[in-house]
Each structure stands twice: as C-alpha cells, then as structure tokens.
Amino acid sequence: MKYAEISSLSVEERKEKIEMEGEHLRRLRFAHAISPIENPMQIRNSRRVIARLKTAQNQSVKNK
C-alpha cells in the first residue's frame, strides 16, 4: 500500500487497516515458525505497511 493511498483514508479506516495488517502479520509469523513460508519478504512488507499506517495516523493527530 502506497503512502498516497494511506493519506486518503479516514482515521477509522486507518485503524481498521492497522488491525487487519497486524492480524495478517501474526498469521505470517506463525506460519513461518511452523514451516518456512514461500516468500518471507511478505513479513517485511507487512511490517512496513503497518509502520506507514501508524506514521500517517500520528501525523494526522499532530496536525489537528
């Protein structure tokens, strides 16, 4: 998810996306712990999306 897409989301939508991506990351980590997943870069990408969402959320709070 690109930052331009994230900045167009509302605060509630960002919160939902953070929760969804967090759950997705937990599932990926669990699957990787049991047996190596096919593409371990998915874990890194998921972490980065969560970081982007949280950064956008913090910036919107500071700007108000």
Image (spheres, helix red, strand yellow):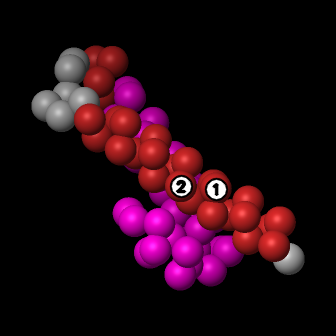
Question: Which quarter of the rendering shows the N terminus?
Answer: bottom left
Q: How many marks on residues?
A: 2
Q: Is residue 11 magenta?
A: yes
Q: Position of residue 50 (x, y in %)?
A: 52, 50
Q: Is residue 10 magenta?
A: yes
Q: CA distance from mark 2 to mark 1?
A: 5 Å
Viewer-nearest residue: 28 or 41: 41
- Is residue 46 among what the camera can see? yes
Amino acid on which the number 1 mark rests in the picture? Thr
Residue position marked by numbered label 1 in the rendering:
55
Viewer-nearest residue: 52 or 43: 52
Residue 23 placement, left or right of 56: left
Residue 36 placement, left or right of 8: left
45 above or below 7?
Answer: above
Q: Which residue is painted at 38% across and 29% down in the image?
A: 29
Residue position marked by numbered label 2 in the rendering:
52
Instruction: Identify the magenta region.
Output: 1-30
Q: Which residue is painted at 66% across and 74% down in the image?
A: 12
33 above or below 7?
Answer: above
Q: Position of residue 64 (x, y in %)?
A: 85, 77
Disc 2, disc 1: CB below 8 Å? yes
Viewer-nearest residue: 63 or 34: 63
Q: Which residue is painted at 53% across and 81% down in the image?
A: 8
Amino acid on which the number 2 mark rests in the picture? Arg
58 above or below 29?
Answer: below
Q: Helix, strand or loop at disc 2?
A: helix
Most common SS among magenta residues:
helix
Q: Which residue is painted at 72% across and 64% down in the image?
A: 59
Residue 14 placement, left or right of 63: left
